[in-house]
Image: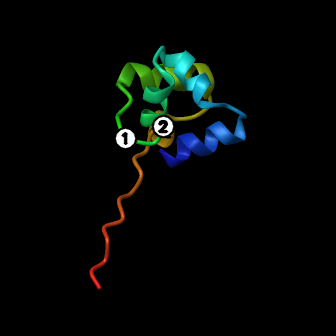
Amino acid sequence: MDNLKAEMQRNGLTVRDIMNTIGCSEKTARNKINGETDFTYPEAERVRNKLFPGLRMEYLFRPQPTNPKKSA
């Protein structure tokens, strides 16, 4: 969720803003923002519609690319 984190920073938004928007605990919001658990589609829609109305869902919630460890 690198794009989501970047947009949160640009707009001065916090984990608490996400938490309040989707109605969950702070820990759950952090886990979702950090990609440890997924946003449901309705949650993602609420975040986009309320906090980032000018941005596309595909951009905000693009998964982070995985970097497999290179063997030595």
**Which kind of residue does numbered mark 1 sit on?**
Glu
The amino acid type, in three-letter code, at marker 2 is Ile
Q: Is residue 2 left or right of residue 43?
A: right
Q: Nearer the viewer, residue 71 or 54?
A: 71
Which residue: 39% across, 19% down? 42
**Is residue 53 visible to the viewer in this orientation of the structure?**
no
CA distance separating discs 1 and 2 = 8 Å
Residue drawn 72% across the image and 34% down it: 12
x and y, in percent, of residue 24 in the image: 46, 18
Query: Which residue is at a point 42% across and 35% down the rendered structure image?
Result: 31
Residue at the outermost left position: 71
Q: Residues within 10 Å of mark 1 (few under 14, many from 20)?
A: few
At horizontal 52% and vertical 35% (from top left) the residue drawn is 56
Q: Which residue is mark 1?
A: 36
- Whether label 1 touches label 2, CB < 8 Å: no
Query: Where residue 5 sits: x, y (%)?
Result: 57, 42
- Residue 9 figure quarter: top right
Where is residue 45? Give x, y as percent: 46, 22
Q: Quadrant of the C terminus?
A: bottom left
Q: What kind of colouring is applied to the model shown?
A: rainbow
User: Could you say which is closer to the camera, residue 52 or residue 43?
Assistant: 43
Tell me the SS state at disc 1.
loop
Residue 36 in sight from this viewpoint: yes
Residue 35 image position (x, y, % from top left): 40, 42
Comparing 59 with 66, the one in front is 66
- Count neighbours of disc 2 (C-alpha within 10 A) and say few if under 14, some if 14 to 19, many if 20 or more: some
The residue tagged with tag 2: helix, strand or loop? helix
Total marks placed: 2
Disc 2: which residue: 33
